[in-house]
Amino acid sequence: MAPLFTIRYQSLRSLLLVCDAFVLKFIQTPIWMIIYALPFLRPKRDWSLRRIIMAKYVQHMVFMSRMFGKVAISPDHRALAPEQKGSWVDPVPKELLVGRIKDMAATAGIEPIRLPSYWIDREGCDVAIGAPPRPGEKVVFHMHGGAYAFLSASPEDPTTHIGRGQMERCESIGRVFSIEFRATTTPNNEPVNPFPTQLIDALTGYYYLVQTVGFFPADIIVDGDSAGGNLALALTLYLLENQNREDVEFPAPPGKLLLLSPWCDLSPIHLTPGSSWTEFTHIDCLHAGYMQDYAEIFCGPFGLQEAEVNPYISPASTHPSLSVSFKGFPRTFILCGGSEAFRDQIRVLRDRMVRELGEENVTYYEPSDAIHDFLGMTWLEPERTNSWSEIGRWLDH
Ligand SMILES: *[C@@H]1O[C@H](CO)[C@@H](O)[C@H](O)[C@H]1NC(C)=O
């Protein structure tokens, strides 16, 4: 199991965070400043001292959750987050669970359930919850990252800047919607809700957007960062594979897909000497053993070997038995940090998508000095601003 220590009391958690902030500020940071003052000791020699230290901070946050699991507790699927624009969404009808996903849900004992959902309006607007779309209105359906175990769909979550950023750059986007898909660990770090729980929950959100709210699928932009990118891929794949069924009608796939540092191979296949996993281990926040732990929790009763061959879990796996097709996928933008551990698997994903969809339908952007899921890191400039410009252009196109 992932964390070494589990803290059950909120007061202890708060104390730990205060102590950690103190040590980080007054002990750890000065040590880093002394060591990395010498460029030849920096993990990347051409990086500024500030950039190295900020990257070390991000690594430290991940280190804390390796040690203690969930220290700061996020809202989860059991309740609506207080003081947020949200409502409960009914579970997706069971007829929409078909084929392999239906069987795997039965094996894992997973049923669709009612879930909290959230809306973010444009700055200065106040749209009623679930109001029908205005003519031509587009909506962002955001899937948050966090290794499927951390963070939340609530508008206070750090990843919601991704939806807000799209809204700022594209006038036809009226709102951002998100569904509180079930996490794979409890607040006390016990494993729960393995695959395909989150795919079923994403489907619940998508079905609601189309059937209840009334958005045309073509007006939906699905985005996801890191594990959220994995989920965005799985949802799109599932919708596409089940178009034109005779027994049950599936909503059409979304109009666009935005993938930010997507986790697209949960298996250890890409974890080899000389790969991006080993090359960026001193600067990127992703830790191989840690991510494998969360991949294993996600695979639940199916075991990590399922991640090698299941296209909904690892569409970029290079296992010879994996069969995946991106035929019919919407226009896709893929953002990848050129110095992130996932780089190799994301390039495999890009190559597969380009092969089937054509260059014009897949936009790929990889700033060489950026790390994992960097779009929210205000210190990672000019990479961040440049990436947003590329995304803005793609949204308008
Ligand atoms: C891009 O996608 C459109 C719509 O699916 C398709 O008609 C077109 O052929 C694709 N382009 C290439 C180069 O495959």
Image: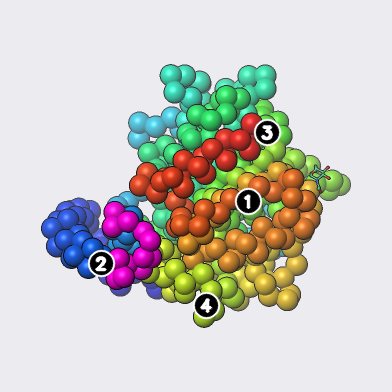
Give the alpha-carbon distance from disc 1 to disc 3, as whole Å. Answer: 15 Å
Alpha carbon distance from label 3 to label 2: 45 Å
Badge nearest the viewer, 4 or 2: 2
Location of mark 2 (residue): 38
Q: Residue 5 carries which label?
A: none
Identify the mark nearer the N-term, 1 or 2. 2
Task: Give the image quadrant in which the ligand numbered 1 is located.
Answer: top right
- Looking at the picture, which amino acid does disc 3 mark? His
Task: Give the label, 1 or 2, closer to the camera.
Answer: 2
Q: Is mark 2 on a helix, strand or loop?
A: loop
Marks 4 and 2, how far apart in space?
A: 26 Å
Q: Earlier in the sequence, mark 1 or mark 4?
A: 4
Q: How many marks?
A: 4
Inspect the image, locate mark 2, and give the three-letter code of the amino acid beneath it.
Leu
Is residue 43 on the magenta stretch?
yes
Residue bearing mark 1: 364
Of the 4 image quadrants, the one containing the C terminus is top right
Q: Residue 274 carries which label?
A: 4
The answer to whether marks 4 and 2 mark residues whose Cβ atoms lie closer than 8 Å is: no
Q: In this view, does 278 lie to the left or right of 329?
A: left
Q: Which amino acid does label 4 sit on?
A: Gly
Q: Does the magenta stretch include residue 146?
A: no
Residue in the picture at 47% in, 19% down: 125
Q: Position of residue 351 (x, y in %)?
A: 70, 60
C-alpha distance separating marks 1 and 2: 35 Å
Q: Residue at x 46, y 40 (%)?
A: 385
Which residue occupies the foreground of this view, 159 or 84?
159
